[in-house]
Image (cartoon, rainbow, N blue to C red):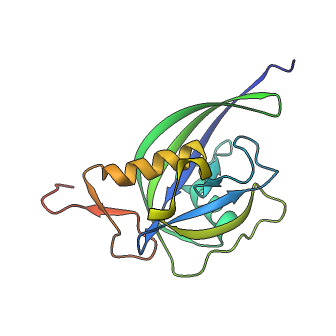
Amino acid sequence: MDTRAQTRVSAYAIAVEDERLLLARLSDASPVFAPGLWHLPGGGIDPGEQPVEALARELREETGLELAAAHLLDARTYAVRRRGVSWNLTALFYAVDLTAGAPAVAEIDGSTDAAVWIPLADLQDSMLSPAAADARRMLEAGSGAVREGAGHGSAWRPAKGTVT
């Protein structure tokens, strides 16, 4: 029995447009979560890389879209076992604004094989990675904010009466 343990810190984008969430489908190359699940665009932070820089890089690789703005919303931890590795993942969730464009995977042989906007009403936990399922619950709860900001792919903006 292989008992390797890995720790990873990742940055993930929560982008909502027209009541749709931007998601990337995990490929067989996904190191942490199972292939075929829909996951938030984003990924591991390289040594010396700032979280928002990693988020922008991963968004370009996984969706072809450019990050315009990011706001840290939450952090969660996950314990996952995949391919003989026990992963201890810390996920940083960012509400993001994106530049205009259609999503398309830019990275060849990467951890994702598709990027699409999926209607929030169509999302079920069984089709989502644990992190994406948590993001869906964050959106449902509202976390004191309203979905859909003024920009393209904007996750959240302050609710009326909310102090920022």
Instruction: Tell me which corner region of the image, top left, top right, bottom left or bottom right, holds residue 116.
Output: bottom right
- Where residue 37 appears, as percent x and y from the top left, is 67, 52
Give above or below for 39 relative to 81.
below
Image position, residue 83 (x, y; %): 82, 34
Q: Residue furthest right?
A: 1
Residue at 84% from the left image edge and 60% from the top image edge: 109
Instruction: State the image coordinates of residue 66 (x, y, percent, origin top left).
Output: 57, 72
Q: Quadrant of residue 81?
A: top right
The residue lying at 71 percent from left, 40 percent from top is: 32
Q: Nearer the viewer, residue 84 or 120?
A: 120
Relative to 20, does residue 42 appear above or below in the rendering?
Answer: above
For the residue pair 50 and 143, the one nearer the viewer reads as 143
**In front: 46, or 160?**
160
Residue 111 sits in quarter: bottom right
Judge left or right: residue 72 versus residue 56.
Answer: left
Q: Quadrant of the N terminus?
A: top right
